[in-house]
Amino acid sequence: MTPSCPSCQAPFTPGAETCARCGASLLVAPSFGGADPVCAVHPEWRSVATCQRCGAFACARCLRQGPEGAICATCHEREPLAPLPWDQRSELGLFKAFWRTCFGMLVRPADIVRGVNPDGSVGSSLGFALLTAIVGFVPTCLAYLVLLGAAMSFLPGLNSGASGTDPKAVRLWAVGFMAVWTVLVPLFATGITLVNAGLDHLILRMGGVTRGFSVTLRAYALSQAPYIAGVIPFVALYAAPFWATGLRLYTYRTLHRTSWGTAVAGALALPVLSTCLCCGGYAAFMFFAFKSAGKV
């Protein structure tokens, strides 16, 4: 959030104490008995912004410019931003930056996430999500492709042509379908990341979060790190979703500087709701199926 002048509402650069547009002082005393927020360090001055790291109210004298926006002087001196390996792709190389980020998120997420720039471009976050999807799903899809080919070679009816179909054409169609699906799954998973992050962001905003969607998307993408377990086929499908949900809760709380309650709502509301809808739909289907069967 860009701080603005209390007199003319023009934005100003953190560190200034006089408005460049109207010339008024940015240090304004709060009105007596009013509800104006005051600076956490200088209560004699009105707050003109909240720190983008700790959320504290700050006057113009306390504001500093950080990579993520206006921050208070305390955070500026105490907690300089640490570089995220994924943001150092030009120096480390794509795959080394990806591996270091994933490994850090798995073994020491607090050290990786603490102090990093909470914001990042949408393209950067989606690129990270795409790589985790490739590693997480492609080996499993290839394993299924091999199993499918082996299974079809042992089907007696298919090999004998008794069904009236061309065995070679059937095998080619099945293998081709799985090959196309192998390519599309990572793209589909990346799209799901974008959609789910958007829905989570709506819930986080209802909980009082003020930072933008790009922060939520960055947090969601980083939480996908457990999917690198997919280098071992079938592992990521069962273990990674639960691990990723736990990491998502932590990244939402840390990058958005919000409460545990809001982070839990943002990370779990969508999975819980979708599970309830799926279970409710299945129960309704079975109920009507048995009811219809009883009338026959």
Image (cartoon, rainbow, N blue to C red):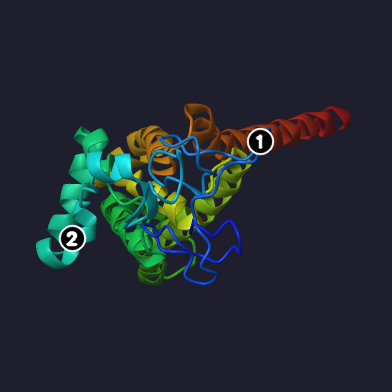
Left or right side of 143 for 14: right
Residue that mark 1 sits on = 32
Q: Residue at x 42, y 59 (%)?
A: 190
- Against 241, residue 100 (above or below) is below
Going by the numbered disc 1, the residue's amino acid type is: Phe
Q: Secondary structure at mark 2?
A: helix
Going by the numbered disc 2, the residue's amino acid type is: Gln
Q: Secondary structure at mark 1?
A: loop
Instruction: Work out whether residue 233 can be spotted.
Output: no
Q: Residue at x 39, y 49 (%)?
A: 61
Q: Position of residue 194 (x, y in %)?
A: 48, 57
- Against 175, residue 293 (above or below) is above
Within 10 angstroms of label 2, few (less than 14), some, or many (20 or more) residues? some
Q: Give the camera-side residue of 111 and 61.
A: 61
Question: Reading the chain from its start, which is encountered first: label 2 or label 1?
Answer: 1
Within 10 angstroms of label 1, few (less than 14), some, or many (20 or more) residues? few
Left or right side of 160 for 213: right
Which of the 4 image quadrants contains residue 277? top right
Viewer-nearest of discs 2 and 1: 1
Residue that mark 2 sits on = 88
Mark 2 to mark 1 CA distance (whole Å): 50 Å
Q: How many marks?
A: 2
Q: Position of residue 215 (x, y in %)?
A: 43, 52
Q: Which mark is residue 100?
A: none
Q: Residue at x 36, y 52 (%)?
A: 155
Q: Position of residue 126 (x, y in %)?
A: 38, 61
Whether the residues at callouts 2 and 1 have beta carbons within 8 Å, the answer is no
